[in-house]
Image: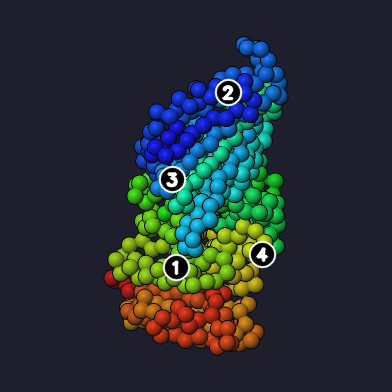
Amino acid sequence: MCLDGHCEHNVKPLEPDTADVRNAGAGLGRRRLLLAGGAGAAALTLAPVSFARAADGPAGAAPANGSEATRTITGFLETGVADFVHLPVEVPRGIRKIAVSYSYDKPSVPSGVPGNSCDIGVFDERGSALGGRGFRGWSGGFRTSFEIGAGEATPGYLPGPVNPGTWNIVLGPYQVAPQGMNYRVEVTLTYGERGPAFVPHHPPQRAKGRGRDWYRGDCHLHTVHSDGKRLPAEVAAGARAAGLDFMVSTDHNTSSSHAVWGEHAGPDLLIIPGEEVTTRNGHWLALGLPAGEWVDWRYRSRDDAFDRFARQVHRNDGLVVPAHMYCAYVACQWKFGFENADATEVWTGPWTYDDEHAVSTWDQKLGEAVHTRKRWLPAMGNSDAHSEPQVIGLPHNVVHADDLATDSLMKGIREGRSWIAESASVELAFTATGGGRQAGIGEKLTVPAEAPVDIRLDVRGVPHGTVRFITDEGQMHQESVGASGTGTVVWRTTASLAAYVRAEVRHPMADGSPGQGNTMGDALLFGPMAAMTNPVFLERKGR
């Protein structure tokens, strides 16, 4: 098949008598460009690859159990090709396993020019439509091969029967060099009985909690089921070592790990299924998914598909959370807006300028929300840990919930009853007291406009830390705690002066100074974040 008249699409059998080269080559005149499911990123569909002939034995005889048939497909993609290239594979009856491997060239490019990068995944005979039922796995660019059978599959892929029909191997040319991309895909089918079915072990939705309390959890973690290098057992062990009560599994674009978390959860650790949905215009976390639920990622902001998948998550009481909105990597920066978001990740991994920028954007959104009396967006912090030496739980969320249960924790995060800590050694309490009433993080205190309100932060675990109180007017108070890292800071304001107050606790600057406030560009004048809260809102009585 030809792309723009400059490529080839050839089928090359490993055994000359197991493929019909003429039939495969017939696709040269059948180029077509289509939108998956009618709304999504452009997908180019190539000519189908046939396995019509038996792998062994005389014509008409059933293939021998364990025999294999292989087809090899080569092609060329130019810069500007569709986001996804579908390679249909006609799978006959009697298949026990499908195995796929692929490679592509990586020509040298000048500094600053994108080189070749290509993802891969597969959809089964139920179809490859956007959001459809045929999803069977995705490994992005992390693996060069995968296998699927009834009882087991490569991590990132879903075990199950290899039914007859048209399967689609999907290539995702993430970047294409100016020289173009030569690719090679090899598909091997193994004949035989299916064998025993895979038995999933999903995690429970509740663990042994402490009733209504604060619970610590990292909601952005990866395993070998996507591009992480840690096994699920290692991630669970890391969460326990970090002093976490819960964690959310968020492998990129696949639900395959959901089926193995049950053996790693326990009374001391709640494991919640999720997914990092990796689109071409930003990444977002789908938190609190039903076990096995998959969320499609094959769209851009211009495709008007994001709303549909946000609704999918919301129908199951899950959360939609834009992730690392200012990440500098290709396709990571957030372009979908915040209307459908339930929270936003403002701190990802060790503190960097990207996080400063994200907190600034989030604070701006807070100001807009209180002054327009619209819904406000809570902040989250997560590690996005993939492998050593990335630290699980740096940072994590401390959530006030009715119990250590998925629904309670999602509710607490959605309502902003949470704060962010760099580690379990950091503790804080943040309240606003006035008019004989008290409100905590994520809550509202309604008082007369001029009534005094005392803002109090108790902190422990940040030696020489600097406490900042920030309102809709900016930083209004700064005070340092001593070498012990334990202290109490109190500041008085009124509802007429502050629509909300939030707190930050910062480490000292590299030179040991506490940093400066009320200065233009002060994002560069403070040390790394140790903890930060969602706001307490102050409302004028009678407004």
| Callout in the foreground (4, 3) | 3
| Pointer 3 residue | 78
Residue 219, image x and y in percent? 56, 57
Q: Quadrant of residue 409?
A: bottom right
Q: Is residue 507 above or below residue 294?
A: below
Which quarter shows the N terminus? Answer: top left
Q: Nearer the viewer, residue 403 or 467?
A: 467
**Among numbered discs 4 and 2, the one appearing first in the sequence:** 2
User: In what element is the residue under mark 3?
Assistant: loop
| Pointer 2 residue | 19
Residue 284, image x and y in percent? 47, 54
Is 339 situated left or right of 329 in this image?
left
Q: Nearer the viewer, residue 57 or 447?
A: 57
**Among numbered discs 2 and 3, the one appearing first in the sequence:** 2
Q: Residue shown at 70%/46% (left/top)?
A: 263
Q: Is residue 341 above or below residue 495?
A: above
Q: Residue shown at 51%/31% (left/top)?
A: 10
Give the spatial CA distance, label 1 vs label 4. Answer: 24 Å
Give the spatial CA distance, label 4 vs label 3. Answer: 37 Å
User: In what element is the residue under mark 4?
Assistant: loop
Give the spatial CA distance, label 4 vs label 2. Answer: 48 Å
**Type of amino acid at the residue the image marks with label 2:** Ala
| Pointer 1 residue | 358
**Type of amino acid at the residue the image marks with label 4:** Pro
User: Does any portion of residue 115 appear in the rendered image?
Assistant: yes
| Pointer 4 residue | 389
Q: Is residue 426 above or below residue 265?
A: below
Q: Residues within 10 Å of mark 1 (few under 14, many from 20)?
A: many
User: Does any portion of residue 309 appear in the rendered image?
Assistant: no
**Type of amino acid at the residue the image marks with label 3:** Glu
Q: Residue shown at 54%/30% (left/top)?
A: 11
